[in-house]
Image: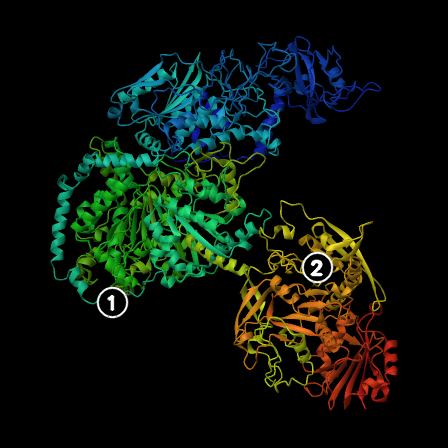
Amino acid sequence: MGNSYAGQLHSTRFEEVLHSSIEASLRSNTVVPRPVFSQLYLEAEHQPTAQNGRAENEEDDEEDGSESNSPPIPYQMKPPPEGSCTTDGFCQAGKDLRLGSMATECLEVPPGFLLVGAKSPSIPDHILVCAVDRRFLPDERGRNALLGFAGNCMGCGEKGFRYFTEFSNHINLKLSTQPKKQKHLKYHLLRNAQGLLVRGPLIRWRATDNRVRQTGAVVPAGPSGGEDPLSAPQPTGTHTHPGTHTLSGTHTHAASALSALNTDAAPPLHMPDNPHALTNGNHCPPSQQPLQQSGAATYGRPSVIGTITNAGPPKKRHKGWSPESSSTSDASTKATTTAVSGTRPDNGAPVTVSQGSSPPLPPGESVTVPDFLVQTCKLQPVIFTGHGKLPALCGNSAEVLVSPLLQACYRSSQALPRVYEQYGATPIQPLSTQMQILLTVYYLVQLGPHQMPLIEDLEQIFMRSWRESHLTEIRQYPQTHPHPQMPPQLPGLPQPLTPSQLPWLARLAASSSGEGVLVLDGAASLAEGLEDVFLRLMEGRLAQTSYVVLICMGKSQGLESCMVVTGKHQCRALAESMLSPGDNLKEISYEIYSGMTTDLRAFFNSLGPDEDMEGVLEKASVESRSHSSLPSTQESADDSPKPACTEYRVEWHEIRAIQLAVARKLLSHVCAIADSSTQNLDLGSFDKVEFLICVPPSEVTFQQVILHLWNSGVLQELGLDQEVLSLQQVEQYVVKLDQEAVGRIDGLIQKSKMNPYTLFILVHDHAHWDLSSSHYSGGGSREGLVDSLLNCRQIRDAPNILTLHVTSFPFALQTQYTRISPYNEIHWPSSFSNDVDLYHEKTKYFGISELLESTRSGAGLPLLRFDSSFENMAAAVEERFPKLHSAVIRTQLLIQHYAVALMVVAGQAHLQKHTSVETLEIVQCLLGSAQRCPSNHGHMVLLRVASPALALVAQQRLAHVRDKLGFQNHFEVVLGNPSSALSLGKHFLEQLKVWMKVQDPDWTPRTYLELEALPCILILAGVDPLGESLPRSLKYCDLRVISSAYLQRTPLEQELGLAAYLVKVGDQDARAPATASDLSESDPDKLSSTDNEEEEVVVEALLHKKRKRVYSHDSDCLSVSSCTSINSDLPGLDPSPPSASQHSQHSQSEASALDPDKPPPQSQPQSQSQPQAQAQTQVQAQTPPHPLPDIRDPGRAARPEGDPSTAQRRPSKSTSSGSGGSSSTRASTPRQRCSWARNLNRPPVVLLPRAVYQVLTAPDASGLPKSTALLPHPSVEWASSFRPLLSKMMTCTEQSLYYRQWTVPKPTHMDRSNRAPEGRADNFHPRRLLLSGPPQVGKTGAYLQFLGILSRMLIRLMEVDIYDEEDINYSEKLPLVQHHQAGVSWPSMDIMRTMAFDYTIHDPKYEGISPIYSTEYTPSEEGNPRRQEDVYLRRRTSRIKLSKYAAYNTYHHCEQCHQYMGFNPRYQLYESTLHTFTFSHLLLGEEIQLYFIIPKSKEHHFAFSQSGGQLESLRLPLVSDWNPDCIKSPIFTPTTGRHEHGLFNLYHAMDGASHLHILVVKEYEMAVYKKYWPNHIMLVLPTTFNGAGIGAAHFLIKELSYHNLELERSRRVEHGSRPHDVWPFIILADDSCVMWNALDVDPKSGSIGTERNVSLKQVLQHMESSADITQYGLCGLRKWSSRYGNQTGRHHEPFSRGHLHDFLLLNVDLTQNVQYNQNRFTCDDVDFNLRAHSAGLLVCRFNNFSVMKKQITIGGYRTFIVKTKMTDVPTTVQPSQYICAPDSKHTFLSTPAQLLLEKYLQHTSHKLFPLSARHYSHPVLSVDCYLNLGPEVTVCFVSSRPHSINLSTSGLLFGGLLLYFCDSFVTPGFLKKFHFLKGATLCVICPNRSALRQTVVRLELEDEWRFRLSDEFQTANAKEDQPLFFLTGKHI
């Protein structure tokens, strides 16, 4: 159904306007009523509230019995009897009278009484149930009510109330005015089909007058309840076709289209025998008691058009009554109530029970179609079934088409949305049959002569009329409940539209159209009416009629209707739309190859001079050859050297910022799927990406994607060497969706099964192309292939295949049965927001909305146009050839126009009238553009021809004409067939090679993008564009011959998408000043025909949001492109341009010439409402023409501008004063600027068919283009007619949700089978994504970049930042002594004892701490200079790919370790128990109570008491135990702040070996660690250690382990083992250890080989199996460094004695007396290593093993922050403020005292110990501890323990003495062994001032050290925080 109605139903409602027109007609003396329907959609909108308020007031006035306007009389109610009930809604006896309470009760109503509803002003929301004698109530017409009252109370049963005043008191109405039954008895109460008592129609207390009620309509049912007229089956003999929603259905087969509407295929709902009756008698449910009042009045909802009656003079306030107007209503007609309920069955077709009925037709009733109908009428009529059963067609039935679409529309509009069916008392019903017919007639009247009726427009009219008639109810009952509680009741209102009124009103509506719409209502049946229509057609009486509406009101059949389309244009379009696109192509091919177009070609040939157009072509060919024989021909000119164009550039392969942004959005959605709890995508398990891109079967699209892939760099991201790959090898990543794709997809599925750790991305590009279901496709059909391949079970269930759908038109993938979650949709973002370039790429997308905006901007010629001359010629030819397909006619006509235009440019100016201005403009631009560029760069013209057969004809004909005219080297004619590759002539192929600098002699262009700047006509064939991108040189997009039959959103927008363009905003802004003066300058280039300066003005105005009107739409002097004004300058043309009137007459005369039988039209004034584009045939006189030189004659091209012949043809031009001279000077020196480069930033001009143009530019209520209101895709259908329009404010996501709610796939759609399973609301596929964006915006580049960054991310997920630092503090002077052989596997204890302990710290993380004095190490003179690369990067790291033996954090999840982690959904969350473990320690002075959280699965590692189940000990193995799948040492990992990032998942690192892993956490972090690691054992530190450092954790671990060792020894002794047989080792591991490596060493040569990843299991089992391992106190590993094997001057020692860090194998038995310092925050491991060595313990480092530490920037024990106690927030506190004088008022800090002391000494010791700063030979003597004094101060560690191992300090002078918490082993004699420099500094640190004084006295320090009172300090802590005190002094 073509164009929409002219406007919207603003303001005045339909009934009011129609009523006013009826009254005016009745009062008028004229015969023909005045047309009023044009008012309906053009008036200003009224406020609904005011409108409703007025209606309600009128109703109140009517129900009030008084005619006066006097104020109401005050009324005092009689006081109720004492003790009676006065509650509102209850009678005085206390019984409930409210309808809601009594709806289900069985009420006894006396004979002759009726139930009515009373309204109380105190409870307006309730109705009170009463029984009233029917004699005192009016009948259905408001008459025959007796005065007085008789009623009963239905609550208490009291009877005999004779006065309404008394009765109102009894039921507690509590009135303030005089009680009147007319005012307070409001409604009849009725029983519905379910037996519920509901509110019925209003009681008509007044007789019906001629005022119109604004309510719905009803149709009386016939005496015999017959079958549904809407669902009657079609006769078998009817010739039907499916069609589209141009009132002809969709592209489906005829049988399926009819079966969806026949009762056999979709029967109506099963209703009870009398389903619609609402009873008002004995009020029991129908199942209990039959109806007793067959004659009782039943009511229906009155119609929009009320009954016009005149029972007498009206009230005084009614002014519309005239004495001569007679009643037109049938007083005897009884309105019966009908209930219409609708549902939608599985196939999506609406199934309704219609109003009205008709008996079955007699068996022999049929209609005979006359013979030679098409030949006589030159049209094939289309019959639209409406209401009732269409009679069978016999005879010449093949020449009549039948469509069921209008009937389906009627059904759909009567299927009430379920949201309105939930309120039983709400009077909401669908439109009546009469109203549907009347609105249909009105809509047909609104259509123009060339417009097609649109089903969407008619549905919206129905919807709007229905909504306005129920506006009050819709607002009163908001749509909150999704399911109805009861069906709607349809109470009657006073004035229904009766069937007798319908014909008169329909004829009144049709009268305003002249003869365009004819209403026939005289026939007794549809058969008789159709016979009349056929007779009129044969007699020629319907020549000016487009639509005939038949209305039959037979007494037996009821109301029947149908519509017959008799307009020639409409019939042809409807007939073609009823064929599928494929059938249309077959029909076109048949007509071409069967010779049916011979007469058409002969007709076109006869239009030329002497009726021989071919003769004219031959003449022009002779002239062309004479020009080519001149010496100055193009060929000779080509031999001479020509300057090359410097402006040529190709930009289509560049990656833009917005594409990268979209790629990141895609990646974030993939990560969201992986992070969800559904476990649908395990990104952590994939190590690489592979992909396959599926494209439609178009060779150009296939090669285009390959080219994009080649230039994107994605293959390099995947690790492929592109230098060794060819384009043919790249084809393995792209596949066309044809039969060859089956093997490729199968191969992908097999690879996915064989490579579970590879993520396969299946990209479905142009995803809207084939949506056919594989179940409905034929065996050899290509349709359904996508469904069978991409929706197969193997791809659906594969956990490593991710499907990405990419499309510009996602609507058909957004239905109620979609497979894609709305959360998995990625929409292309807008690059501009409030004129701000969000991505800084200076490009702006110019798409469909901008094209439409150009038609409204008024800044110049719109870029979107239609060719009125072409349309008029096409219409005339179509009338002459009624049996030919319109595509054949229009395409042949367009070919003729191009051929004639070429001949005009070649010099045959007299043929100009045989082509259109637009075609001539295109040809001139095509030929002229290349001549302005030295390299012959030009423009592309796209000619869209859907039929491949027609496209081939067009290519051959245009190439033939081009060659005949000698233009074979000026432009190419390219045939774009999806099934074949491009083919170019040799001349143009060589040109492209030169431009693109291609050296390959065999190169040919494979894509349209490679035709950049080539002057050519591209004829693009195919039903739909298949994703082909076009070059930026596209200048004209000629869509004049696309099909107008399929008016749906996707087909229309994908055709317009061919013209989508990216405009460079920066370049446009730069040219803006010059553009503003384009119309006033006389630069010949600017004024030439190829520049289209007015189009540039349009683009400028759109881009810069300028809305200044340059030309009015109503003006007769609309400008046309300068291309149209240069016709006079062509060789042989009349120098004076034609005027507008001349051109108008020319186009009309041409149309007449095409049809000799048609008389010439009379000149008619142009309507002011004509679109601006129609005025493009006029010529603007002010625009100066510019001569286009003969492009075949360079001599003519070089003719100077001052030539008299040229000057005479150039008209004068008014400019500003003083500009004439400069203009002529500039005009005399034309510039040779490349026209292609100049137009590179201007969007193409689009030419459309008139029907499509009118649909697109028609106003729409939503503010969006009209195409958005159309059916989104041929394979879907609307879920309901009661749907809102898309809103302009909707985002892409909201638009997607709109289509998901309001569209359903057809049975042939591949998603039709994707129904949600039972219990689920949807059936989304978890691994499907949808990327949507406008056409030509760059989606291919975006998803290719997504593949690249996804590959990088997977590699990134498999990689971690590993600390990669070279060991520090190595001295080159160390002797090269080899202790162990290079290839030995285990250390020898004897050799280890001979090795010296290396005091020097080599771990790079300790580069900033105090070096330890050693006689074997001599630092370099410059100290330890920072490496240059570490200046800005604190610590060096390397990206290392995780091995299969890595440790993971909580983000890793795979199938193998789900059970280990405790997150496997098949298992319950692991239960844990809390156990207490208590032991005592002398240093702490109290018992220590620790808590173990032990999962049930780990309880076997512990021993529990048999009696109470108390935790006794942690089980330890024996030294002699050996199990290859078990680790003997328990692993303790102290951690804080790293519950997510700590590497506690050791499942893969242990290679599946059994092990015991215990996380040591602080008490306040217990819950969060338990949440993330539910299957791990937790050791919870006491609350007092919440603020402690790493030393406390190590201390408690070690003490707990030793205590546990003693318990295990006791337990094992009971079982016969010796105490020393129990395994004494534990493992202390840092929470950032990620991988472990083994170094391969050649045992013979000792050379270091490669370092490979090994499992932690292998490392630990190797260490645990060392000989005499229990004799070692401490074992550890080397820290990994990539430079380890490259260190010069160093030999490789497999084992060494030195400091161990991060990963320790600790012997808790031998280290019993060596404790970790529980107070330490930093360097506790260094302190422990020194004390362990001094105690004589063997410390061994396995250098053949290394541990990798991951850089974790979150949490850890080193992240303590110094903050004040006042603010409790981090503040900037200088290290000097960490201490203060004792008892000072210094601001106290809330940081632990020990940490303050360590930080103070670290930062200020170079001032505290000045004699030791930078003097390695004068270190600070530190007794029994190591404290970090900063990198400038060297520390010499000594132990005071007897038998300890210390360095020899003889002859060493110390620069300071540090005494930290000295115990009794430190004596004065011990200190006297050491010698100090004079002035050396002493620092004594104690826990309190008392201990400080006692230490000074006990050690006799005052003998050699001088102290001052000011040298005593404390840490800046409050007293309750136990600050530390220290005293400094100087050596005497």
Q: The residue tagged with tag 2: helix, strand or loop?
A: strand
Q: Is residue 1128 left or right of residue 1242?
A: left
**Residue 152 drawn above or below residue 1349:** above
* Label drawn at residue 643: 1
Whole-percent x and y of residue 1928?
A: 80, 83
Q: Callout 1: helix, strand or loop?
A: loop
Amino acid marked by disc 1: Pro
Marks 1/2: CA distance? Answer: 79 Å
Instruction: Using the image as rendered, state which of residue 129 and residue 723 is in the foreground.
Output: 723
On residue 1559, which mark appears?
A: 2
| Residue 1252 location, quadrant | top left
Give the x, y percent position of residue 1112.
38, 46
Specify the quadrant of the image occupied by residue 1542.
Answer: bottom right
Q: Identify the mark at residue 984; answer none if there is no mark.
A: none
Name, please, the residue furthest toward the front. 1616
Q: Nearer the viewer, residue 1353 or 700?
A: 1353
Q: Nearer the viewer, mark 1 or mark 2?
A: 2
